[in-house]
Structure formats: structure tokens, C-alpha cells
């Protein structure tokens, strides 16, 4: 019975939202719009991070926040370009499998001297 009463009491506030701000010079419309923009940004970052498998980043300064957004957006763009290139070439593999293949690549630096002497080496995981 008490649960039903609590539910009925809570229903009085259905459809209401409370916005809290320290920006006292903003109008009601500006406050609502800033919350909408913030919500859109947070959802976009959450989507990017989940798609890219990024771990939470605790950043506080404006520069760090912008840097984090830049890295996420750049990674998402590179991933999208890779997906398009694979599709254009008719390669049927996931981005994750492709990334694992790229991690195994080796680059070799080979130098041939004027006397025909060959020298060189390779470094795993690094592409020159």
C-alpha cells in the first residue's frame, strides 16, 4: 500500500525537469539549450568511446577536454576511412581484425651502399 502511495506522489511530478546552474545571467531558454547541447556532446563522446573501445578519461581543464574530443573524433574518422577503403577493395573483414593484422606488420630499412654492400634491420610494430 505504501509503495502505491509513493508512486502516486511521484506521479505528481511527471513531466517536470529541474535544471541547476551557477550562470545566473542566462535566460530560461539559454539554460535549457545549454543542457541540450551538453547532453548531445556527452552522448556523442560516449558513442565514440564505446565504438573505439576507449577507457574513461578524467580530464578537467578546457584544453584537456578539447584534446580528448579531438583524439576521439580523429580516431573515429580514421576508423571510418579504413572501413570505407576495405569496402571499396572488397575486403570482407572487421576493423578489429584489420587492426590486429596491422599491429603484426614489420617495416624493414634496407640500405645498399655504392659498393653493393647491403645493410638493414627491421622493427616490429613500426611502419616507416
Image (spheres, grey):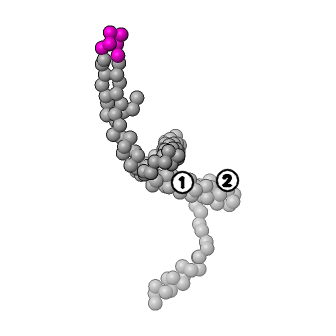
- Total marks in image: 2
Q: Is residue 68 left or right of residue 124?
A: right
Q: Position of residue 107 (x, y in %)?
A: 36, 30
Q: Position of residue 61 (x, y in %)?
A: 50, 43
Q: Residue at x 46, y 87 (%)?
A: 2
How far separated are the C-alphas under marks 2 and 1?
28 Å
Give the residue furthest to the top: 115
Front residue of 76 and 37: 76
Q: Position of residue 114 (x, y in %)?
A: 36, 10
Return the residue at label 2: 25
Q: Residue at x 36, y 33 (%)?
A: 126
Q: Residue at x 31, y 28 (%)?
A: 122
Q: Quadrant of residue 24?
A: bottom right
Q: Is residue 21 visible?
A: no
Q: Badges 2 and 1: C-beta atoms under 8 Å apart?
A: no
Return the residue at label 1: 44
Kind of element beneath mark 1: helix
- Magenta stretch, residue numbers: 112-117
Q: Nearer the viewer, mark 2 or mark 1?
A: 1
Q: Position of residue 20 (x, y in %)?
A: 58, 61
Amino acid at each position: 500500500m505504501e509503495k502505491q502511495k509513493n508512486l502516486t506522489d511521484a506521479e505528481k511530478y511527471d513531466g517536470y525537469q529541474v535544471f541547476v546552474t551557477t550562470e545566473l545571467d542566462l535566460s530560461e531558454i539559454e539554460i535549457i539549450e545549454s543542457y541540450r547541447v551538453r547532453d548531445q556532446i556527452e552522448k556523442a563522446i560516449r558513442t565514440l568511446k564505446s565504438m573505439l573501445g576507449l577507457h574513461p578519461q578524467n580530464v578537467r581543464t578546457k584544453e584537456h577536454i578539447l584534446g580528448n574530443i579531438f583524439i576521439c573524433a580523429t580516431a573515429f574518422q580514421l576508423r571510418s576511412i579504413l572501413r570505407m577503403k576495405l569496402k571499396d577493395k572488397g575486403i570482407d573483414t572487421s576493423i578489429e581484425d584489420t587492426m590486429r593484422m596491422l599491429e603484426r606488420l614489420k617495416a624493414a630499412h634496407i640500405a645498399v651502399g655504392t659498393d653493393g654492400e647491403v645493410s638493414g634491420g627491421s622493427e616490429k610494430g613500426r611502419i616507416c
